[in-house]
Image (tube, coloured by chain):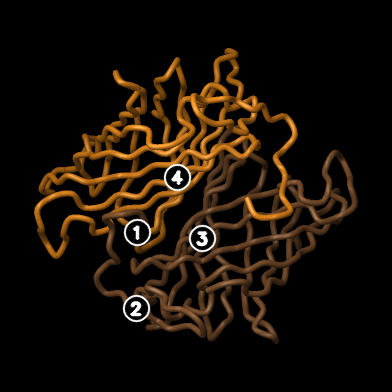
Chain colours: A orange, B brown
Amino acid sequence: MSAGKRSAAGSARSDTATSTVDLHASLLPLAFLVGTWRGEGVGGYEGLDGFHYGQEITFAADGRPALGYVSHTWWADEPRDGREPGSPLATETGFWRVQPGEDGKPVVEVMLAHPFGIAEIYVGTVTGTRIDLDHNVLIRTATARDVTRSVRLYGLVEGCDLAYAIDMEAEGKPMQSHLSARLHRVSD
Amino acid sequence: MSAGKRSAAGSARSDTATSTVDLHASLLPLAFLVGTWRGEGVGGYEGLDGFHYGQEITFAADGRPALGYVSHTWWADEPRDGREPGSPLATETGFWRVQPGEDGKPVVEVMLAHPFGIAEIYVGTVTGTRIDLDHNVLIRTATARDVTRSVRLYGLVEGCDLAYAIDMEAEGKPMQSHLSARLHRVSD
């Protein structure tokens, strides 16, 4: 944050292994996400050749009741269709927050913007270190890719890596596996 | 961009007064936005006391066909309701891009995510250094603020400052002035 800004009321300082994080109390169910993660994934879709990609994701806490989120991916396969290892692929940015559910369980809300004409919202649950984002609403510009719906699953796996899988319904094809990756924490 | 990533095909290097920017050719109509801007604004709404705020906006070009966008605002008024000068207010993040319109004129598409349960898309026009974002579609979580629609106007004003005005329709009240600010460029 630039000069002149201070953290918001209601934030708890949560000490991860190495550093202090300004985490709003409502975000404790997502504390395990905070930090920067890097790793590799596999992408594909009906009619699309499979490919490997590199990825960096950052979840940032600043004391307010939402985590800042940004993801960058890059080509990590043999040169193909003008792409070479390191060529930037996709970027998405937005916010993750937690709201109290009617049953008292935490509800996760994710608001995302994409550079190819799409903005979307996911709503789901967090249980321990597993997040199921199974409700999705998506809006598109007239020139955007023809994506209709997606679902996402995130979770910590052995070795405390972050893994996720994204299924997508697009271009008139049924919901199917699209992207999945495993990332290791590179900083808190 | 982190190690291993290179700028995308189709990008032009545009030299602004002091530095080189990796601007995709499609974004030339928005070249004047690229950089970081800082300044002050005035906010208000029916039933809400007026207030002053500080703001920093960054438009980032990385060679791909969309500008990265992030805005942070902070309280810049007398202490009130637990806020004091510098207290963080709102953050929004997303992407701006240009698509060819049917009449050959550039169409501006803006995809934004907000931390309070809203994602939205604006579509509008750019004429010289004036951008009218008058088409807006917005999706909200069940717990989000009751905003239904907004329109935005951005433009360079004398002294090459960036000014904007945002009108909003919310909480059952008619479309009306909500935020306006004037920012000066602090870096390219």
Q: Position of residue A90 (x, y in %)?
A: 31, 53
Mark 1 or mark 4: whose residue is earlier in sequence: 4
Q: Amino acid at mark 2?
A: Ala
Question: Mark 3 or 1, which is nearer the eye?
Answer: 3
Tell whether label 2 touches label 1 (CB within 8 Å): no
Subunit under mark 4: A
Disc number for residue B69: 3
Residue farthest along the top direction in this orientation: A103
Q: Amino acid at mark 1?
A: Ala
Q: Amino acid at mark 3?
A: Tyr
Distance, label 1 to label 2, CA atoms, is 19 Å
Tell whether label 2 touches label 3 (CB within 8 Å): no
Subunit under mark 3: B
Image quadrant in which the N terminus of chain B is located? bottom left
Look at mark 1 in the image and give the residue it sits on. Answer: A144
Indicate the secondary structure of the residue bearing disc 4: strand
Q: Position of residue A69 (x, y in %)?
A: 47, 43
